[in-house]
Amino acid sequence: MKITGLITEYNPFHNGHVHHIEEAKKLTGADRIVVVMSGDFVQRGTPAVMDWASRTKSALLGGADLVLGLPTLFSVSSAEVFARSAIALLHLLGAVDNVVFGTELGDTAPLYQIAEVLNNEPESFSTELRSLLRTGVSYPKARAMALETHFGGSIDRLEELLATPNNILGIEYLRSILALKSSLRPVSIKRWHTDYHSEKVYEDVASATAIRKMLSGPGGPEQASAYVPAYVSELFRNLYGVTMPIDADDLSSILQYCLVTHKDSLDSYLDFTPTMKDRVNRLLPKCMTFSEWADALNTKDLTLTRTRRALLHVILGIRNEDLREYAEEDYCMYARILGFRKGAENLLSELKRHTALPIISKMADAKNLLNEKALRLLSGDVYASDLYRNAVYQKYGTLIKDDYTEGIVML
């Protein structure tokens, strides 16, 4: 059995994702597709536009055979941690042959060269990077400039390559494969028609960013329906104004409470700098919404995504030390099943034969399968889902199921 892994957010699932799954099957000859998906909060530092169960259903209808949850602690962290944890999960499953991901480049060769330099850090590269950082250049910019110097023009349009989100993630996937000495074979698909953050549309293709904007605008699900499969369009119609869309500003009240309550210890939260903490204490009477806080705390030294993640870490209670203890365990300590396609039972049997990871199919069984450290990681997922449920209820008056009563999505 050939098994191919995909690392996703599906925020929301759209026609480009259908293409990704179909190409992954074709390029790898996969018999089964295993998807690793973020839960209710995503790497850009916001809640997902739809809850994890609805996005899991979309993935299964779109061709996935098994959807596993990426723990929240990792799904809302840096690209490096997001990639390393997801690759580690696929690697530790033991039976996954390939991992297929989209990049703006569509070619892994130059990305591999960059990944090797970043993993091994030759002295000349490290010296140049430190020198640039001392001048006040942001880390992403300094890293790109140091790599440009190291390669001396041998990689075409290197700075442009390093400025695109999927290329950056692709490099981190390759770094993780190299660091783990994994047998996973990486396959890159060129991103289809649209850029990651683009709000432009092309025939029946639009980015998740563009679709989220449509869902929050006057066009709503009707405007977005042209860019998603029919089954996702139906989900939009059924759930719009009932449980979705959810956005960062729906967390404004809880954020305000957390900032006031923890104003003296904000820099103990992941990605929250002392400068950001000082600015919060100066601005507390003035900013009220999540978006206002993200804009107010953002500086030229930080990306807006990192600023949003820092705020989200305060809400989710994620502190600086939380990542360190799981890095020692290759991050993932269990495989939590979010969804499963009926008829793919042989896939589960294959994974169980090859992995030492506990596989969680019923949340109630987790306490008997996991050690204390792993249970703490899982409890972060439950807490995040409860916060998301609260945001849905406050906005729409709809109470969605919690992680224990939802169960596995099966189609």
Image (tube, grey):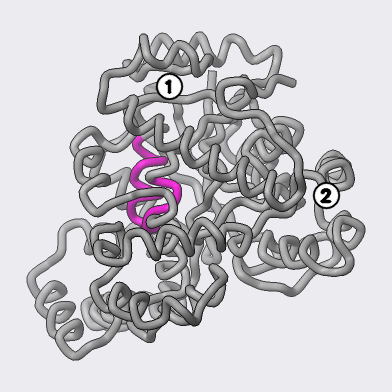
**Main secondary structure found in the magenta portion:** helix
Mark 2 residue element: loop
The reply to whether the C-beta atoms of the residues labelled 2 and 1 are less than 8 Å apart is: no
x, y (%) of residue 115?
30, 59
Mark 1 residue element: loop
Residue sitting at x 53%, y 26%: 3
358 left or right of 350?
A: left
Whether residue 187 appears in this view of the structure is yes
Query: Could you tell me the amino acid type at mark 2?
Result: Tyr
Residue sitting at x 38%, y 54%: 77
Q: Which residue is mark 1?
A: 95
Nearer to me, 198 or 269? 269
Q: Which residue is mark 2?
A: 240
Q: Quadrant of the N terminus?
A: top right
Query: Which quarter of the picture shows residue 24?
Result: top right
Q: Which residues are magenta?
A: 74-88
Disc 1 residue crowd, few under 14, some 14–19, many 20+, Cα 10 Å: many
Query: Which quarter of the picture shows residue 71?
Result: top left
Nearer to me, 1 or 179? 179
Nearer to me, 239 or 264? 264
Cα gap from disc 2 to disc 1, whole angstroms? 38 Å
